[in-house]
Image (cartoon, rainbow, N blue to C red):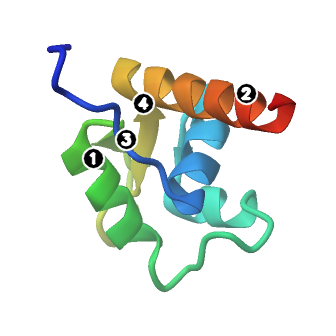
Amino acid sequence: MSQHQQPPRLSEKDVSVLQQLVTRDKYGLELVAGSDGVLSKNAIYVQLGRMEEKGLIEGRPEAAPAGAMGPPRRIYKVTGLGQRALSAHELMLAQWRVA
């Protein structure tokens, strides 16, 4: 990272997704269910697309079972950048609370 590059700013939705993906890979509706109302079904895939563009997460198609109808679900995982951004965010919050 260059001296002038800032760490990614994380929204509440970004943090919810990253915290869940640190423990295991998940698909979109699993993330909604685990978000305590922070994420919505109507906007989850827009959120995930933005996070992929920032390099915070990666998605891949799930292997569809034989005879499955429709497109395969996408499974998401946190990237190294996403892990570092979440760690920096949590450290900043901890420092904020101490001060």
Quarter of the C terminus within the rendering: top right
Quarter of the N terminus within the rendering: top left
Q: Earlier in the sequence, mark 1 or mark 3?
A: 1
Q: For the view shown, which residue lies furthest in the bottom direction?
A: 42
Residue 42 location, x and y as percent? Answer: 48, 85
Q: Earlier in the sequence, mark 3 or mark 2?
A: 3
Q: Earlier in the sequence, mark 1 or mark 4?
A: 1
Q: Which residue is mark 2?
A: 95
Q: Quadrant of residue 95?
A: top right
Residue in front for this viewpoint, 95 or 76: 95
Residue 72 seen in the current view? no
Residue 21 location, x and y as percent? Answer: 58, 36
Q: Which residue is mark 3?
A: 63
Residue in front for this viewpoint, 70 or 15: 15
| 89 displayed left or right of 45 | right
- What is the three-letter code of the residue carrying label 3? Ala
Q: Earlier in the sequence, mark 2 or mark 1?
A: 1
- What is the three-letter code of the residue carrying label 1? Glu
Crowding around mark 1 (Cα neighbors within 10 Å: few <14, some 14 to 19, many 20+) is some
| Element type at mark 1 | helix
Evaluate if marks 4 and 3 touch, with contact meaning CB atoms under 8 Å apart.
no
Q: Which residue is mark 1?
A: 52
Mark 1–mark 4 Cα distance, whole angstroms, equals 10 Å
Mark 2–mark 1 Cα distance, whole angstroms, equals 28 Å
Residue 12 location, x and y as percent? Answer: 59, 59
Q: Which residue is mark 4?
A: 82
Mark 2–mark 4 Cα distance, whole angstroms, equals 20 Å
Residue at image location 24% in from the left, 44% down from the top: 54
